[in-house]
Amino acid sequence: MTSAPDPASNEILLDLLKRAAAAHGVHEEQELGGVYDEAWPEWYAEHMTRALAERGYRIVGADDEPV
């Protein structure tokens, strides 16, 4: 049985993905000289992890106790 997605979590992730996409476009243009970034998944993950931490969020597993 799967649970329904949390609307608030969905909105947070959607906002972060949109911001990451915009920031990555700038990264490709300014830092990579317009070259397609083959390592974009790693870049997105790091960018989103940092953005979550800056907002006070962290990802924990369902069985993990918050620290």
Image (tube, grey):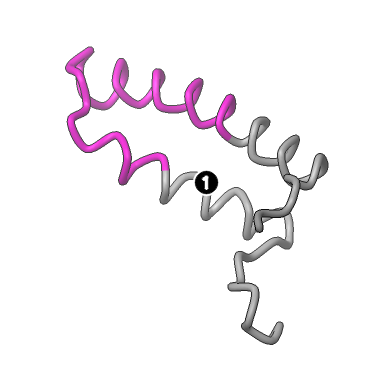
**As shown in the figure, which amino acid type bears the numbered disc 1?**
Met
- Residue 56 in the figure: left or right of residue 52: right
Residue 23 rendering spot, x and y as whole percentages: 48, 27
Residue 1 rendering spot, x and y as whole percentages: 66, 58
For the record, the magenta segment spans 17-44
Residue 64 rendering spot, x and y as whole percentages: 62, 83
Main SS type for the magenta part? helix
Q: Nearer the viewer, residue 59 or 55?
A: 59
- Residue 61 in the figure: left or right of residue 33: right
Outermost residue to the front: 1
Residue 32 rendering spot, x and y as whole percentages: 21, 24
Please tell me in which quadrant of the rendered image residue 60 appears: bottom right
Q: Nearer the viewer, residue 5 or 43?
A: 5
Q: Tell me if mark 1 has few (under 14), some (14-19) or many (20+) residues whose alpha carbon lies within 10 angstroms of its own.
A: some
Instruction: Please give the name of the residue rendered at 65% of the width and 31% of the height, measured from the top-left corner.
Output: 14
The vertical placement of 57 against 67, above or below, is above
Q: Tell how many labels.
A: 1
- Residue 35 in the figure: left or right of residue 56: left
Please tell me in which quadrant of the rendered image residue 27 appears: top left
Which residue is denoted by mark 1 in the rendering?
Answer: 48
Instruction: Please give the name of the residue rendered at 51% of the width and 31% of the height, measured from the top-left corner.
Output: 20
The vertical placement of 5 against 58, above or below, is above
Quadrant for the C terminus in the image? bottom right
Instruction: Please give the name of the residue rendered at 40% of the width and 20% of the height, measured from the top-left corner.
Output: 26
Instruction: Please give the name of the residue rendered at 34% of the width and 42% of the height, measured from the top-left corner.
Output: 43
The vertical placement of 51 against 19, above or below, is below
39 within the magenta span = yes
Q: Secondary structure at mark 1?
A: helix
